[in-house]
Amino acid sequence: MCQTIVHRGPDDEGIYVKDGVGLGMRRLSIIDLSGGHQPVHNEDKTIWIVFNGEIYNFLELRPELEKRGHHFYTNTDTEAIVHLYEDLGAACVEKLRGMFAFAIYDERRRSLLLARDRLGKKPLHYSLKDGRLLFGSELKTIFAVAPELKEVNNEAILRYFTFGYVPDPHTAFRNIQKLPPGHLLEFEAGKVNVRQYWDVPAYGTREPRSEEECLEEMETRLAEAVRIRLISDVPLGALLSGGTDSSIVVALMARASSKPVKTFSIGFRSHDFNEADYARVVAKKFETEHHELVLEPDIGETLDKLTRILEEPFADSSSLPTYFVSRLARQHVTVALAGDAGDELFAGYDRYAVNIRRRHFDVIPDWAGRFYRHNIHPRLSPAARGRRLAYNASLPWRERYLDNISALRLQDRDAAFLSRDFRAAIQECADPMDLYRAYFDRSPARDRLSHLLYLDTKTYLTADILCKVDRMSMATSLEVRVPILDHVFLEWVTALPARWKMRGGQQKYIFKKLAERVGVPQEVLKRPKQGFALPLVHWMRREFKQDLTRLLLEPRTIQRGYFDPQPIQELLTEHFEGQRDHSVRLWRLLTFELWHRNFLEQSDRDAPTPLPLQFGRGKSSPGRGAEPAVSGRVGAPGAMP
């Protein structure tokens, strides 16, 4: 199991096996390079931990624990968790500030505790079958010893076609789950208990007295979140896209660093998608040591590799530039800070403004909307002008947003590319939107915008953005830290009323004010929003045209039973001839097929012979190590696996 994730922890391996229990980890050494070997134990070696992530407040926790009589034998953050567990049990997670996924085995209780950080920066998968618990940072760790669990979950596949990713707690496999962010899993006497320990707090509960007060406190809090993420015994830098969020992080890093910050950016030859010029402006402003890579459009080989690394079907095309910028950074540093999550915290996505602007559709009676959807919309040609907008306008406001973030409606012709057999197979599956409606219903928000921010924080942020960052950076053995998602900072931002995030149609209002305050150049602040995306439209019509057609229509693809070739041919023709831009939908189909070939089929060929014992899970640096992963498993107490 450990060997499947050497990329997560190339520096060290550690294994604990006793009485039918196995824990294993791979380490990426970040803190206490020589003394942080995992698994780490308590004083009498009755409690053992494997840990992936970073605890940024461990230097504050350690003196308190020593005062209570605990003795440390390492200088790592990992050991602080062990001693906190001795005092507090599962509640130890409430004291941790950082990103983490860990497993603690308590020999005296013969129990296991799994925990995942509040926002889901670090991954954790598990499976309980026949009283045996398997767990790991990646799915490959579980398949290494239980290949029979590789049974595709059609309900998860339906979610993928709808959203472009598989949301927590589901995986693409029927008998494997993701531990959701902010949750614990306790395993004892062969039984699993999963419970939530944290959630995003109530929105809009604190009104600043003035804009100056708001900016001053925001700057202080985010500067602290950046500063504590600069602790490292190895070289450290920043991923700089040239957008507002990463530019703010670099500005605060430059202020806190005694040496020039190392920054890394990706560019494209297609000007429409190239942000490198803006990154250069920021790098010059803050006098960083800047490194840049211009990507060529030959992506076939990279796609093959990345669809295997991602382990599940995943349609966010920005995974490619994320991989390349991580690989570039890893040539110079082991740890990098990034600016992710500013859009989810401060309402940066255009879809928020679109949903707010469409509130005038609220006056349409429910009966009229239903009549249009059931009797008129199905009769319109897919090419009819305004067809999609009319459908969206006919929905209640919550459903309008869900419609905006989905790419598939099974009752509509949009799903025509799905085969009749697959449609029949998913007839009894739950509506993919039900999970999202549940988040809406329990959202701690009173205004429309905050409901949307909560939903995206619980779904898109963790299952798409953070999953992408973790997988792509770990593929290159780079640890990425995200200061904007410091949970203390996030809770403060959440408490701000919505008008501080979107005002007069201006998105990220107060965050852009902060950017001005810390010196981010005006060229960056006033530029159109691009996002970290690929020039898919152009590539699919030129360099990638032949390969795309072959991959989607050859018999090997169609015989899987998911797709109907005729509608796919129509999509390709319309796209290649410039009639419509189908690049997002075609990319979704392409990455799904490549996942089948490069993960499912390839891993079947590479599957090792199962060993009589299996291992556990892991962490980056066992001290403050950043991202090794580990994988794991614990057998039923008292029984050999």
Image (spheres, rainbow, N blue to C red):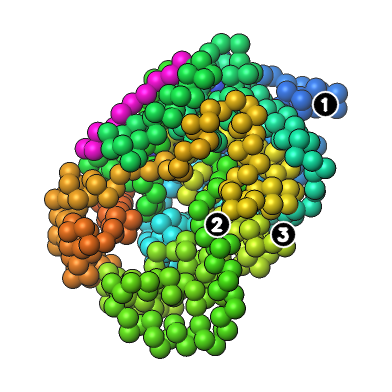
The residue type indicated by label 1 comes to: Glu
Q: Residues within 10 Å of mark 2 (few under 14, many from 20)?
A: some
The residue type indicated by label 3 comes to: Pro
Which labelled disc corresponds to residue 444?
3
Q: Earlier in the sequence, mark 3 or mark 2?
A: 2
Whole-percent x, y for residue 620 in the image: 53, 30
Residue at (46% x, 24% y) in the render:
281
Q: Could you say whether the residue bearing mark 1 is in a helix, strand or loop?
A: helix
**Viewer-nearest of labels 1 and 2?**
2
Whole-percent x, y for residue 402 in the image: 51, 66
Q: Earlier in the sequence, mark 1 or mark 3?
A: 1
Residue 294 magenta-highlighted:
yes
Residue wearing tag 1: 64
Main secondary structure type of the part rendered in magenta: strand
Residue at (49% x, 33% y) in the render:
524
Report whether 11 appears left or right of 215: left
Residue 196's place in the image compared with 363, above or below, is above
**Viewer-nearest of labels 3 and 2?**
2
Q: Could you say whether the residue bearing mark 3 is in a helix, strand or loop?
A: loop
The magenta stretch is: 289-298
Residue at (15% x, 55% y) in the render:
550
Residue wearing tag 2: 353
Q: CA distance from mark 1 to mark 2?
A: 47 Å
Residue at (34% x, 40% y) in the render:
273
**Viewer-nearest of labels 1 and 3?**
3
Q: Is residue 421 visible?
A: no
Q: Residues within 10 Å of mark 3 (few under 14, many from 20)?
A: some
Residue 333's place in the image compared with 221, above or below, is above
The residue type indicated by label 2 comes to: Ala
Q: Residues within 10 Å of mark 1 (few under 14, many from 20)?
A: few
